Image (cartoon, helix red, strand yellow):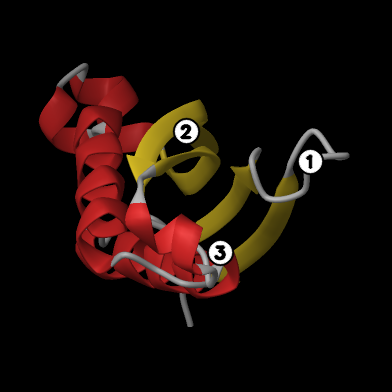
Amino acid sequence: MTGTTGLADLRVDCIVGIYPHERAAAQTVFLDIELDYDFAPAAESDAIADAVDYDHVASSLTTLLQTRKFQLIETMAEEASAMLLDRIPAVRGVRLVIRKPAAVPAAAASFVRVERTRP
């Protein structure tokens, strides 16, 4: 019983960017995360231990983004996807969108989208 769980518009304030003013102060990025996994064990047990804990997902991603201080959101997306696949063995696939609202004044946001599956 494969299904998808995730988070929409996870807000993280972090250092991200290549320009000096972007390296001097945190700015907001928003993440949409979709994680595919087999829901059967969680549905049967009704226990968080058998499910993907999205509180853990949110805190792990927040820590990574705030600690790593990425220059490119492309690198951020690749490392975030790899971390989720590495730390959550039940996850078979990750879809991740990262939006950076302050990147281009004339646009609502710049963004990257990645989709990764477990080999």
The kind of residue tagged 3 is: Ile
Nearer to the camera, 68 or 87: 68
Mark 2 or mark 3, which is nearer to you? 3
Label 1 belongs to which residue?
A: 105
| Helix, strand or loop for disc 2 | strand
Of callouts 2 and 1, the N-terminal one: 2
From the viewer's perspective, tell me whether residue 77 is left or right of residue 52.
Answer: right
* Residue 52 in sight in this render: no
- At x 50%, y 75%, the residue is 75
Q: Is residue 79 above or below residue 31?
A: below
Q: Residues within 10 Å of mark 1 (few under 14, many from 20)?
A: few
Mark-to-mark CA distance, 2 and 1: 29 Å
Label 3 belongs to which residue?
A: 73
Tag on residue 88?
none
The image quarter containing residue 46 is top left
Tag on residue 6?
2
Q: Are marks 2 and 3 in contact (CB under 8 Å)?
A: no
